């Protein structure tokens, strides 16, 4: 069934009662009964403390939680004078549809600023609301992206795929393109709600990179804001990433192909301004990782899909990949370096652009190679203190920029054949 809106009629009736809002803070939610009340109360505290003269609305856009998430969100204490709506959105299940509802409500209330925060956060502080909304309200930015401290094993999809590709393609050092917590102008939010993407992977985990890329393509003024440590519910990067990996990477590759004419001329990346810093002093929480499982996922995956790699990757990349796999299987160090990783990802983008079969299956065949690169990274940073790994992540991102002509050549050669 195709829904023309994610907002239910009962919510529209409530919005008529509320009228105009200055700030909408949206919280996409599904089965987060343990954290949602803390998020709602903290957001309410932030709105009251930093924007006491603004009319604010908190929107919990729920995916039909099977626990007590909605009840806890509704009963969470918030300061008087702040409006709250807790509702199940309409449409395909997924974080993206939750965003659609939030963006539509932003338009219906004619809000100047829309802030979105994840519902599994444990490190959120009241000043996050100020940091994400204030640059929008002061018209100093159209999009405010988060800048976090994260544990060295956290955010591996961001660090090894989304960040370096986004940086190299579009020429900006956008550190957390899928951070999940950001601010955007009411105009941008309202415009995004009208786009025809709500029956694609964007409706699920692809929403964050889609919104970030939209801000880039629309040439919004983008700034970052330092939110301090990000502590949330995370998974061991050696576990099966399932739908999240498939949808994030598939959306990233789709956008890369869709906007090729916008990034083909981008050269050296430019830093993004960081405005403001959270006063929160929450410490990072270690993220466990099973090195044995990472190595096994890599070696067994390469053997399983070896025929595909041999047929579709360049001879150089394929040969290097097999050598690394063989050494890893023998128990030697996994020497999967950033140069090879950049070239392989660029080859996969090119393959994706012409792939006429099941693209999800194509991304599944990339997953073992991702495990290989993460194995090499985890081996290298194992003894690092918090923050020291950032130098390696930056070095890898620079390598993606250096290898960008390789990607351009792949497309050029394909067009000349």
Image: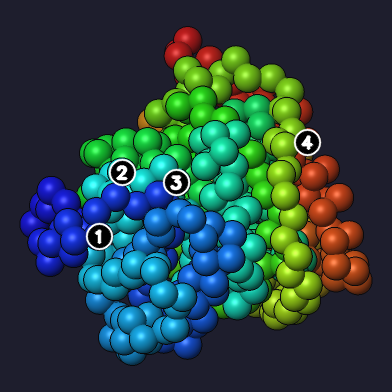
Q: Choose mark 2 or mark 4, whichever is in front.
A: 2
Q: Which mark is first along the chain, 4 or 3?
A: 3
- Which quadrant holds residue 93? bottom left
Left or right, residue 385 beside residue 402: right
Left or right, residue 221 beside residue 322: left
Disc 1 secondary structure class: helix
Mark pair 1, 2: CA separation: 12 Å
Q: Which mark is first along the chain, 4 or 2?
A: 2
Mark pair 2, 4: CA separation: 41 Å
Q: On the image, numbered disc 2 is attached to which residue?
A: 110
- Which quadrant holds residue 203? bottom left
Q: Looking at the image, which residue is at 64% across and 73% down?
A: 123
Q: Looking at the image, which residue is at 53% across and 41% down?
A: 136
Q: Residues within 10 Å of mark 3 (few under 14, many from 20)?
A: many
Mark pair 1, 3: CA separation: 16 Å
Q: On the image, numbered disc 4 is attached to which residue?
A: 398
Disc 4 secondary structure class: helix
Q: Nearer the viewer, residue 311 or 26?
A: 26
Q: On the image, numbered disc 3 is attached to which residue?
A: 113
Which of the numbered marks, if any, corresponds to residue 94? none
Circles 2 and 4, Cβ within 8 Å, touching? The answer is no
Mark pair 1, 4: CA separation: 49 Å
């Amino acid at each position: 069934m195709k829904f023309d809106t994610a907002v239910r009629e009962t919510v529209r009736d409530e919005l008529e009662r509320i009228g105009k809002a200055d700030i909408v803070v949206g919280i996409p939610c599904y089965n987060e009964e343990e954290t949602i009340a803390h998020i709602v109360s903290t957001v309410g505290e932030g709105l009251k403390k930093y924007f006491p003269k603004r009319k604010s609305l908190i929107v919990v856009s729920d995916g039909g939680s099977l626990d007590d998430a909605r009840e806890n969100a509704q009963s969470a204490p918030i300061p008087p004078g702040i409006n709250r709506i807790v509702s199940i959105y309409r449409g395909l299940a997924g974080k993206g549809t939750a965003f659609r509802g939030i963006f539509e409500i932003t338009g219906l209330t004619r809000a100047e600023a829309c802030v979105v925060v994840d519902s599994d956060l444990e490190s959120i502080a009241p000043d996050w609301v100020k940091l994400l909304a204030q640059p929008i309200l002061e018209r100093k930015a159209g999009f405010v992206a988060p800048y976090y401290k994260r544990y060295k094993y956290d955010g591996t999809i961001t660090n090894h795929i989304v960040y370096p590709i986004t940086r190299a393609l579009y020429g900006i050092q956008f550190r957390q393109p899928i951070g999940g917590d950001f601010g955007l102008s009411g105009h941008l939010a309202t415009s995004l709600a009208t786009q025809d993407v709500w029956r694609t992977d964007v409706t699920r985990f692809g929403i964050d990179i889609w919104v970030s890329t939209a801000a880039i393509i629309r040439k919004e003024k983008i700034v970052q804001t330092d939110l301090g440590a990000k502590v949330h519910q995370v998974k061991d990067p050696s576990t099966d990433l399932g739908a999240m990996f498939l949808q994030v990477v598939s959306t990233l590759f789709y956008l890369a192909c869709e906007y090729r004419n916008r990034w083909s001329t981008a050269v050296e990346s430019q830093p993004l301004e960081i405005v403001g810093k959270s006063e929160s002093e929450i410490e990072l929480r270690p993220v466990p990782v099973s090195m044995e499982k990472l190595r096994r996922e890599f070696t067994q995956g390469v053997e399983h899909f070896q025929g595909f790699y041999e047929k579709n990757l360049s001879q150089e990349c394929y040969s290097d990949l097999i050598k690394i796999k063989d050494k890893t299987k023998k128990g030697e160090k996994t020497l999967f370096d950033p140069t090879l990783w950049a070239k392989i990802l660029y080859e996969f983008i090119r393959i994706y652009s012409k792939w006429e079969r099941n693209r999800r299956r194509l991304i599944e065949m990339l997953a073992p190679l991702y495990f290989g690169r993460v194995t090499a990274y985890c081996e290298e940073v194992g003894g690092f203190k918090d923050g020291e790994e950032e130098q390696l992540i930056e070095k890898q991102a620079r390598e993606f920029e250096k290898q960008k002509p390789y990607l351009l050549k792949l497309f050029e050669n394909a067009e000349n054949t």
